[in-house]
Image: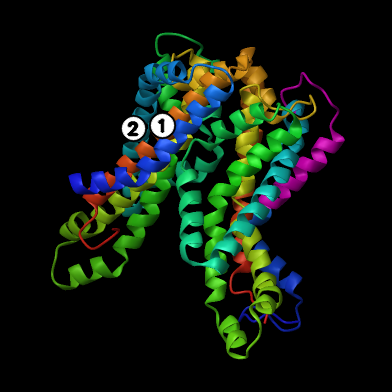
């Protein structure tokens, strides 16, 4: 299957075209390399809990994994709400998107921390609480993606050809929307990482008792260890920059891509 | 302006009431004194509000000035500073900066100023990024082009046509950062020992006092809503008629 885009030769597979577009955004490629490098380093480094260099690098993948799980749940929920809202239209569309937009300006990390405490301060509770709050800002972009797709010619043509709505949804809308929804929801990942670290920093993190970046920073702040704190903050900052850069690269990847 | 303010406040009032009622309901269901929890949160709120509003206004003014200067003089020192600040913005969560400042400089007389600086820096980064991008787009946009085509001077085109919508959008954007700043304020209050609502919430959560925590969280949520509403009202005031409404 070829990709309908001027910069996509017919001989290239969609995956190679996507990679070409992604890697053309140099910060995105650097960000991806940085994240992969961090993961490899965490596997190779010894588990030294006193080294200000090693400890943040070893604990960062735990935070990243927790954030990834929470963000994935959040994106799925937000995408489902966005698809439902765009499909239903009317008052439900207005209510769902309006409420999600209003709620997303609340102090969400504090809401997540309170939710995690209410769920019993275990890992599933923390992840569910983070997923719930990162889903809120992702509803708007997911809804916009679906709204945009529903106005495309291929959907209009399918309607005109008498294709049933359910088949349009499964055959045309969702295949075209999947990558876009994932990219639209990508900011949920850095957001979830910040919230996970915030919870750990305040002493409400719960990743099976293991240390995460947030708990490392919280302990460093509590014990007045500026070197460990700065090191962990630098790793977190680098991860956040890398994730934001990857998000921009993914945005370039799905631009003008379409499955007929 | 009063009509706009009333309309916007009326729009968020039902949600604010629901949030406060939910906070009180959690307090009652957990066997606590919801009214006392709300009163405690209200008493601690001024410290949090002072931190949040100070950080939002200070960060926005600094970031906007840098961002506008960067858009007008991209190759200058301030242009480089704004680009650097804007680029680093996503890597600067307020609670991390507060922890770094608290650990480096320790507790002392300048605690509130350090907390304010830690909270203002991410706001400044966001404002610098937005101001630079929006003003550059406005200067190259059709409104300024049309004004210049009618013989309006470059300075007048900037101040009368390009800046007002940019400032309105920035104020609106900054108002939406209220929730994030309140979270940073909670961490800063804990770190610097300031008696604010954020510190109260963390303290209640650590002690497992659901009633107090729910009331304080509801109070902070309503505060974020009101900050966003204030930003929207101010943005309405700054926006030229017919645009950004």
Quarter holding the C terminus of chain A?
A: bottom right
Residue A120 at x, y percent in the picture: 71, 26
Residue that appears at 73% across and 39% down:
A66
Of the image marks 1 and 2, the number of the one nearer the N terminus? 2
* Lateral position of residue B237 relative to residue A229, left or right: left
Residue B65 at x, y percent in the picture: 31, 42
The disc at residue B120 is 1
Residue B3 at x, y percent in the picture: 20, 48
The disc at residue B58 is 2
The answer to whether A38 is drawn above or below residue A72 in the figure is above
Q: Is residue B162 magenta?
A: no
Instruction: Mark yes or no: residue B206 visible.
Output: yes
Circles 1 and 2: CB distance less than 8 Å?
yes
Specify the segment rendered in magenta: A30-53
Magenta stretch, main secondary structure, is helix
Residue that appears at 39% across and 55% down:
B133
The disc at residue A146 is none
Q: Chain of mark 1?
A: B
């Amino acid at each position: 299957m070829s990709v309908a885009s001027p910069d996509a030769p017919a001989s290239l597979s969609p995956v190679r075209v996507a990679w070409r577009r992604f890697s053309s955004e140099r910060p995105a490629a650097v960000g991806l390399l940085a994240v992969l490098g961090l993961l490899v380093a965490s596997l190779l480094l010894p588990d030294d809990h006193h080294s200000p260099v090693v400890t943040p690098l070893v604990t960062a993948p735990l935070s990243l994994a927790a954030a990834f799980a929470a963000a994935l749940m959040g994106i799925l929920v937000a995408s489902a709400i966005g698809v439902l809202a765009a499909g239903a239209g009317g008052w439900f569309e207005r209510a769902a998107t309006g409420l999600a937009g209003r709620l997303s300006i609340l102090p969400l990390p504090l809401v997540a921390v309170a939710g995690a405490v209410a769920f019993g301060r275990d890992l599933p509770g923390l992840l569910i609480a983070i997923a719930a709050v990162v889903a809120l800002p992702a509803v708007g972009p997911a809804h916009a993606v679906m709204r945009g797709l529903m106005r495309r010619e291929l959907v209009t043509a399918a309607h005109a050809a008498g294709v049933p709505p359910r088949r349009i949804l499964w055959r045309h809308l969702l295949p075209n929307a999947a990558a876009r929804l994932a990219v639209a929801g990508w900011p949920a990942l850095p957001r979830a990482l910040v919230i996970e670290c915030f919870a750990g920093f305040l002493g409400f993190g719960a990743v099976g008792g293991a240390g995460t970046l947030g708990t490392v920073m919280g302990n460093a702040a509590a014990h007045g260890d500026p070197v460990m704190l700065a090191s962990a903050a630098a790793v977190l900052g680098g991860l956040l920059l890398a994730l934001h850069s990857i998000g921009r690269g993914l945005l370039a990847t799905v631009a003008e891509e379409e499955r007929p | 302006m009063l009509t706009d303010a009333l309309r916007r406040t009326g729009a968020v009032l039902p949600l604010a009431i629901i949030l406060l009622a939910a906070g009180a309901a959690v307090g009652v269901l957990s066997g606590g004194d919801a009214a006392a929890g709300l009163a405690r949160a209200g008493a601690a709120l001024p410290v949090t509000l002072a931190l949040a509003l100070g950080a939002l206004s200070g960060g926005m003014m600094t970031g906007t000035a840098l961002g506008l200067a960067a858009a007008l003089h991209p190759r200058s020192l301030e242009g480089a500073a704004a680009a650097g600040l804007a680029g680093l913005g996503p890597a600067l969560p307020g609670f991390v900066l507060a922890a770094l400042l608290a650990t480096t400089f320790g507790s002392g007389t300048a605690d509130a100023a350090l907390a304010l600086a830690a909270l203002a820096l991410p706001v400044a980064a966001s404002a610098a990024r937005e101001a630079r991008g929006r003003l550059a787009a406005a200067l190259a946009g059709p409104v300024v082009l049309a004004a210049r085509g009618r013989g309006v001077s470059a300075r007048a085109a900037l101040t009368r046509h390009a800046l007002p919508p940019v400032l309105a959008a920035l104020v609106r954007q900054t108002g939406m950062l209220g929730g994030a700043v309140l979270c940073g304020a909670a961490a800063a209050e804990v770190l610097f020992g300031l008696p604010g609502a954020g510190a109260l919430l963390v303290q209640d959560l650590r002690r497992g006092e659901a009633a107090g925590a729910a009331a304080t969280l509801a109070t902070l949520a309503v505060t974020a809503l009101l900050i966003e509403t204030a930003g929207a009202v101010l943005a309405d005031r700054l926006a030229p008629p017919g645009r950004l409404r």
